[in-house]
């Protein structure tokens, strides 16, 4: 069973994409808001019935219902509201994630845990520490979402098929993210050999800023994060062992320990099966270091 905690727009879309991909025959939407997960489950089941897809979606307000889950996704938490500082959001969501993970430990202690709540990297570290799970079992969805945006800008710049684009985004899920233009390829050709330096810089900056533009235009990002969550789940349940950017706890990789941040990792049935260490140049390393510092500072402020 796949459990998604947080039945709002992103959680609902994660359930939708996971059901359409037939990633499990049971999906649980769990939320403290009475009626919300039940209504979302009903709506999804009606769609699945018309599609002839035999996946059952259940809505619940009871944490006990996640017993037997193989994968638990944590989308629960507050969004940033007008007048709210980043630290306000950090403290609110740190409390939410801690309470949720305590319940995961109680009722689904064998599951793989995928944090999605923002700010993603600090929440992934809090989930890891609170759970006490092995580090391979806790990995946050941040870089996969950034990657979807990065690949779209490469597609727009080159006019090539999205299927022909191979790229990676690492570092903090936020303003210090690192879209690695140097490592990106299109039909096997290095991106820097196809587009100008000016266009590379534009793709780099646009990838960083586009989320804010989507939020300004429609109020929230929904479909891309929902799909990114389902892509990570798919790699787990199908044991695909595909390299994906996820936020996971480092133990010496990239020169850091005891911090969760986005890195390329082989994802399979056991979660993070290997972290790939890329040879970063000085500029890339500077961006990665900024991200680590930002995450550590955020965690320090929460605990102070």
Image (tube, rainbow, N blue to C red):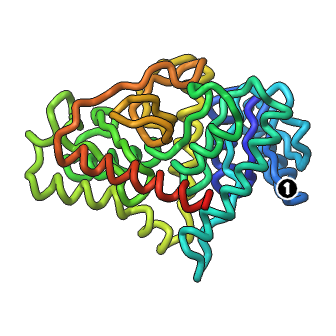
Quadrant in the rendering for residue 57? top right
- Between 271 and 93, the residue placed more toward the observer is 93
For the question of whether residue 282 can be seen, the reply is: yes
Q: Nearer the viewer, residue 274 or 236?
A: 274
Residue appearing at x 33%, y 56% in the figure: 207
Is 86 in front, or is 64?
Answer: 86
Q: Name the residue under label 1.
A: 32
Q: Is residue 133 above or below residue 182?
A: above
Q: Position of residue 213 (x, y in %)?
A: 42, 69
Residue found 21% across the figure and 30% down from its top: 187
Q: In this view, does 168 lie above or below 7?
A: above
Q: Foreground residue, 72 or 298?
A: 298
Q: Is residue 92 above or below residue 235?
A: below
| Residue depicted at 69% across the width and 58% down the height | 77
Q: Is residue 51 above or below residue 89?
A: above
Residue 236 in which image quadrant: top right
Q: Where is residue 69 in the image (x, y as percent from the top left)?
A: 78, 28
Q: Horizontal and vertical percent for residue 148?
A: 41, 46
Report the residue that reaches farthest toward the bottom: 83
Q: Quadrant of residue 169?
A: top left
- Looking at the rendered structure, the secondary structure element under dot 1 is loop
Coordinates of residue 109 in the picture (x, y in percent): 78, 28
Quarter of the N terminus within the rendering: top right
In the figure, is residue 242 to the left or right of 16? left
């Amino acid at each position: 069973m796949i459990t998604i905690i947080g039945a709002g727009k992103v959680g609902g879309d994660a359930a939708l994409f996971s059901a359409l991909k037939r990633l499990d025959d049971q999906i649980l939407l769990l939320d403290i808001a009475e009626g919300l997960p039940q209504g979302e489950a009903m709506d999804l089941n009606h769609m699945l019935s018309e599609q002839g897809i035999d996946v059952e979606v259940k809505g619940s307000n009871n944490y006990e219902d996640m017993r037997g889950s193989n994968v638990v996704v944590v989308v629960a938490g507050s969004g940033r509201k007008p007048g709210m500082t980043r630290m306000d959001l950090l403290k609110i969501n740190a409390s939410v994630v801690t309470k949720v993970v305590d319940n995961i430990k109680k009722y689904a202690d064998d599951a793989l845990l995928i944090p999605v709540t923002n700010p993603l990297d600090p929440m992934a570290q809090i989930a890891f520490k609170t759970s006490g799970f092995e580090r391979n079992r806790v990995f946050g969805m941040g870089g996969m979402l950034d990657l979807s945006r990065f690949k779209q800008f490469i597609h727009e710049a080159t006019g090539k098929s999205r299927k022909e684009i191979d790229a990676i985004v690492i570092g903090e899920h936020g303003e210090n993210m690192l879209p690695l233009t140097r490592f990106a390829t299109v039909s096997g050709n290095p991106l820097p050999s196809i587009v100008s330096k000016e266009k590379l810089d534009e793709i780099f900056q646009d990838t960083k800023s586009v989320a804010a533009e989507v939020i300004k235009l429609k109020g929230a990002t929904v479909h891309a994060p929902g799909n990114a969550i389902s892509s990570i789940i798919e790699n787990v349940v199908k044991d695909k062992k595909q390299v994906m950017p996820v936020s996971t706890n480092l133990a010496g990789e990239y020169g850091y320990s005891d911090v969760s941040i986005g890195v390329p990792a082989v994802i399979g049935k056991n979660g993070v099966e290997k972290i790939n260490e890329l040879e970063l140049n000085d500029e890339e390393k500077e961006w990665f270091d900024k991200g680590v510092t930002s995450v550590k500072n955020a965690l320090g402020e929460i605990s102070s």
